[in-house]
Amino acid sequence: MTRPALPLRTALAQGPVALDGGLSNQLEAQGCDLSDELWSARLLADGPGQIEEAHAAYVRAGARALITSSYQASFEGFARRGVGRREAEGLFRRSVELARSASGDEPVWVAASVGPYGAVLADGSEYRGRYGLSVPELERFHRPRVAALVEAEPDVLALETVPDVTEAEALLRAVEGCGVPVWLSYTVEGGRTRAGQPLEEAFALAAGNDQVVAVGVNCCDAAEVDAAVRAAVDGAGKPAVVYPNSGEGWDARARAWRGAATFDPARVAGWTARGARLVGGCCRVGPARIAALAKGLAVG
């Protein structure tokens, strides 16, 4: 495994970096069953080799930043499966180690995923937010997850798929002082957070926070990205991170994807021109699209 020579913050100042795509869809393409409430995090215990291979598929496609399989991992969720705290801490660390190992000889940044509280509920509430919990309550939930991931020395923490400003504030408080840079990425719809807050307000939360290397959006329709990049750069004065879905919508009740794919790697040039510096895909965006995206970034 080869660590990048430059910190991610420095690299972003020099040009765009290609992120990976959806981990779950690649695992499913490899034949994995992700119907468990732990989703891909279950494989940290039951099939770590599958996770490493999924990461490696994106490295081969040209991704130079990998997001770990810890999105839906939590001490509470692991406990429901009979996994004790010490073993759970090891699984959090393993998520970082697997991504690092999958990089092989390529210099790849590893982003440890810190998914929202709603993801742990496994009921689609990360697309609604406003869980009825206070900032201190959400901070208490996230802080142990952050600590476990930080032990494995990722290059950055991905505070991702955040549905509202309340949880974003809690996450930023939970990571404060941990010694690892972060990016903050909201899931959005109609030019607002999923909870309905203006994006300018959401991104302004990171303004002046030196720990935050980028702000932006993920797990949304690609049509949302252009306006979101402008709002991120203007609202926070940071580079933008963007990794939208393929275009289909997730039906949480049916646990199925609906609609047509709209993700088009040709849009990337417009995103980077507006200030996007971390660019990839989320759900249902696989290695083929990431390969086209990475090629476009290299040409640009």
Image: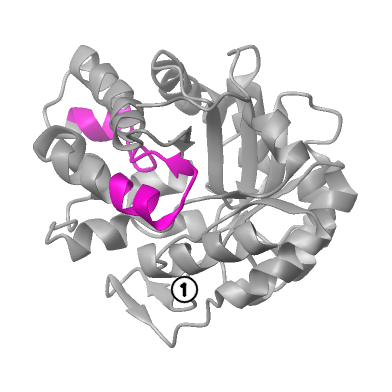
Q: Identify the residue at image location x=41%, y=26%.
A: 2
Left or right: residue 232 versus residue 20 is right
Decide whether residue 64 is among the magenta residues. Answer: yes
Residue 35 percent across, percent down from the top left: 17, 58
Depth order, front residue of 86/229: 229
Residue that mark 1 sits on:
246
Residue 251 percent across, percent down from the top left: 37, 74
Decide whether residue 61 is among the magenta residues. Answer: yes
Asked if 123 appears above or below 208 in the picture, the reply is below
| Residue 194 appears in the picture as rendered | no
Left or right: residue 88 versus residue 31 is right
Query: In this figure, what is the number of numbered marks?
Result: 1
Residue 134 percent across, percent down from the top left: 60, 34
| Residue 63 appears in the picture as rendered | yes
Most extreme residue toward the bottom is 260
Q: Assign the N terminus to one quadrant of the image.
A: top left
